[in-house]
Image (cartoon, rainbow, N blue to C red):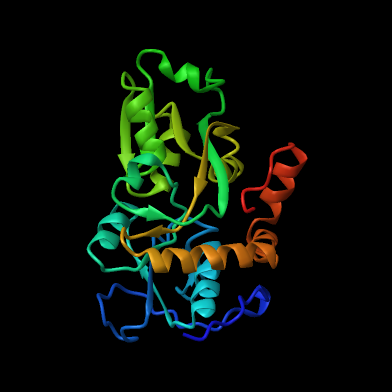
Amino acid sequence: MTRRRTLITLGGGLVSLVLPGCGGKGSAAGGNTLRVGMDLSYPPFEMQDKSGKPDGVSVKLAEALAAELGRPLQIVPMDFSGLIPALKTGNIDLILSSMTANDERRKSIDFSEPYAFTGLALLVGRDSDIQSIDDLRKPGRVISAKAATTGELWATTHLPEARRVVFENQSACVMEVAQGRADAFIYDQLSIFKYAAENKERTRGLLKPFVEESWAIGIAKGRDELRAQVNAFLERFRRDGGLAKLGDLYLAEEKRFLEASGIPFILR
């Protein structure tokens, strides 16, 4: 297969075929289509633009990957909890959805080399007495978490005495805290930064990660050739400045905040 150099002129868009909707093997775009699963409810990484088309850091990364491989792209939107089952049953080829590569998930799927580094942080009430994760160990605490995320897994494993309220949508988790029904929302650092800014009258973010994580692209076990292709792409894309450009395009404010706080930027 003829390979093309990674496209990193992100402002003008990338040449690829984006077909929203779920489709199995050999769907509309043909058997060569690269089917990438995403939960499009996680801006600015996975989202929809004003016209309803997939957009965000992960979408642009998927476009660049498909262009590198010379394959048409199909974004397959679904709930986050359905991504690994879809990969294991062959309904998608890759997961590119801000997914943490952890040991539990490695039992059932493989991952590429990481392309982002983040950590779990806390959203708490503005007047809450909570100052660190240790304060959530007190009796009677209520924690909100998004289903199938590492935040939910961490809370289940490390905060067994706390009551957990779990939702498919992270906005519902934020509202639990903002309206005083939950003491904290456990999620990734950049999202906590954004949600605290959006709800600053009722919430605040504890942004120093208490657990460090890395995000990677999910690949079905046994697809070693595809994994090697993805890793080669990520190495070139990083070296050619693609990750840096995505950060400037979608995360300029967050990048300035992290750098000013002495925290390395997530995309590196």
For the point 37% across and 49% down, which residue is it? 169
For the point 26% across and 69% down, which residue is it? 91
Report whether 127 appears left or right of 223: right
Asked whether the viewer can see residue 264, the reply is yes
- 9 lies above or below 105: below
Based on the displayed image, in which of its 4 quarters is residue 74 positioned?
A: bottom left
Residue 155 at what x, y percent from top left?
A: 37, 29
Residue farthest along the right direction in this orientation: 260
Residue farthest along the left direction in this orientation: 89
- 195 lies above or below 125: below
Based on the displayed image, in which of its 4 quarters is residue 181 positioned?
A: top left
Residue 106 at what x, y percent from top left?
A: 35, 47
Q: How many marks?
A: 0
Depth check, front residue: 41 or 240: 240
Asked whether the viewer can see residue 48, the reply is no
Report whether 56 appears left or right of 179: right
- 169 lies above or below 263: below
Residue 2 at what x, y percent from top left?
A: 51, 86
Residue farthest along the top direction in this orientation: 139
For the point 45% across and 34% down, which residue is it? 185
Depth check, front residue: 252 or 268: 268
Residue 166 at what x, y percent from top left?
A: 31, 39
